[in-house]
Amino acid sequence: MSRRELGTVPVLLVAALFLTAFGNIAFFRNAQAVTAGAGASWVHMVSLALVVYCLLLVLLALLCSRKSIKPVLVVLFVLSALTAYFMDSYNVIIDGGMIANAAATDMAETWDLVTPRMLLYLFLLGIVPSALLLRISIRPQTFAGSLYSRLKLGASVCAAGFLLMVLSGSFYATLIREHKSVRFYTNPMTPLYGLYQYLKPVTADHAVQFAQIGKDAHISPTHPDRELIIMVVGEAARSDHFSLNGYPRQTNPRLEEIGVISFGRATSCGTSTSVSVPCMFAQEGRAEYADGSIEQKENALDVLVHAGVHVLWRDNNSTSKGVSERVLTEDYHGDPEGHGCDTECRDIEMLAGLQDFIDGQAAGDVLIVLHQMGSHGPAYYKRYPDKFRQFIPTCDSNQLDQCTREEIANTYDNTILYTDYFLSRVIGLLQANNDGFETALFYVSDHGESLGEFGLYLHGAPYVIAPEAQTHVPIIMWFGKNYDDVDRGAMRHLSSFPVSHDSVFQTLLGFFEVQSEVYRPETDLLQRSRELVTSSGGGNPVPGDLQVSGSD
């Protein structure tokens, strides 16, 4: 036998040990953190490490035969290395939603995630073990012999794992019953299952007929005035960092001066752009929305087009995620040079030439959607010009682990300050068109952002365990002087109650007084404010009068 010739079982034993020790640091860190107060000792943590080792051995025994062991392990080493980097650095979870979000990310955003530390993880935990594995000769073995050895290995480790859990029963009962979210940090089990979740709808039969909705949509003849509505879709803006919503720092000085209406208790449909943006424009609410359904059914923009509204989508983010497929779309992020920008367009660049577009619509209503780069991380420092570097010191790096919490928060708050400036300029454009239109601004962020709370950064956590920082988002409205179909006092009162992305679809239809079988006034924020006036006889309604459909 050659000196480097080994059987499959020894290779699997070493591979599982390597993945347990180096790929699951975030798992053990989180497990230790949540069980420390329950009397967990080092004995329990050693037991947990052995259980993870047993689980990995079973997984590898199922996936690896003599012929498949090398390609499977190489893939797992690389996948585990990248997963370990993001979990160790940002404490994020790499599940199906995160994989879908990564797949929808363009190259510019991908480069923002690449750091020297990530390359080091990839080299040491992915490339080095793969290179060593490829130098090993696997001992020839019959199919029956290989199957028997793997079954024996699997049975042995299952028995060992079960025994360990029985011996520390109370520890595992507490961990499993009260801290279920910790299991999401197991590596590579969770990313493998996430990959399955992501690929499952892709490989499924898509013989579903594309569904049109709202073909009967039309503008109410009792409202002849032209509407000009600009909707801004924000990126990674969290509600509690807006001074409009009580944040002690003045991050919204311009909007406070203008006097906008801020919904401070709004929640998102998801924790990632790839989920939230399609969901907010979909007819279904968060409870019924299914990932990928935006490709099988029309959305709010299509209904408005059916009603005769002129729709323009300008994107300075990683695409509309399918929302603007059938309307006029201009891409600023994917083609910065084509729009006179350098390597990256600032959000303000999306306002260039908008007046020409508005003037070019001789008749009819107009909706313009501006999809911001906003507060996209981890390179927050790239999202604003130097003159908006008001809160210092800042984190001028995409390696958040090398910055303090204060530096990260300062840099993030500067992005909110720039969004405040951008929205004030949008309102300025609307004010310039007051004489010819009823004008309004509708700002909705797609999701929030974690800035190190509980050791968690960025976004994309599973919704069921996501912190409020990722699910509580700002929603802002502003109405021009000629927009007389809304009671601003009632709208301000409404803004103090919980609302959600579930209201976006119907509110967009409500802005244009669209009549259609798909219109549901109970989730239209504009209509809800009118009902408050009616129910209170024109006075201030009491809180009990209001139940906002679709809110959490």
Image (cartoon, rainbow, N blue to C red):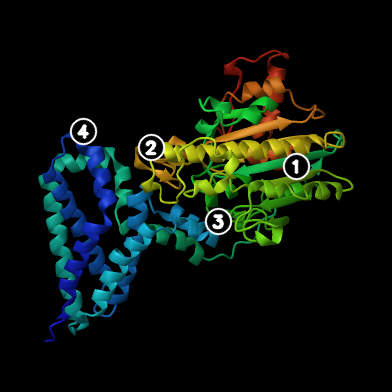
Instruction: Judge whether 455 appears above or below 72 on screen.
Output: above
Circle nearer the N terminus (1, 4): 4
- Could you tell me which residue is drawn at 67 percent across and 61 percent down? 337
Quarter of the rendering occupied by the N terminus: bottom left
* Mark 2: amino acid: Glu
What SS does tag 1 mark? Answer: loop
Do labels 4 and 2 touch, CB within 8 Å? no
Residue 427 x, y percent position in the rendering: 73, 36
Do labels 3 and 1 touch, CB within 8 Å? no
State the mark number for residue 292: 3
What SS does tag 4 mark? Answer: helix
- Quarter of the image for residue 293 reads bottom right
* Mark 1: amino acid: Ser
Circle nearer the N terminus (4, 3): 4
* Mark 3: amino acid: Gly
Q: Which residue is mark 2?
A: 453
Q: Which residue is mark 1?
A: 516
- Quarter of the image for residue 365 reads top right
- Left or right of 27: which side holds 310? right
- Could you tell me which residue is drawn at 33 percent across and 44 percent down? 181
Q: CA distance from mark 4 to mark 3?
A: 41 Å
User: Most extreme residue toward the right, as rendered?
Assistant: 362
User: Most extreme residue toward the bottom, as rendered?
Assistant: 1
Q: Which residue is mark 4?
A: 37
346 or 93: which is nearer to us? 346
Task: Kindly report which numbered mark, 4 or 3, lies closer to the viewer in this rendering.
Answer: 4
Q: CA distance from mark 3 to mark 1?
A: 25 Å
Circle nearer the N terminus (2, 3): 3
Instruction: Judge whether 310 appears above or below 548 on screen.
Output: below
Disc 4: CA contacts within 10 A as few (<14), some (14-19) or many (>=20): few
Circle nearer the N terminus (4, 2): 4
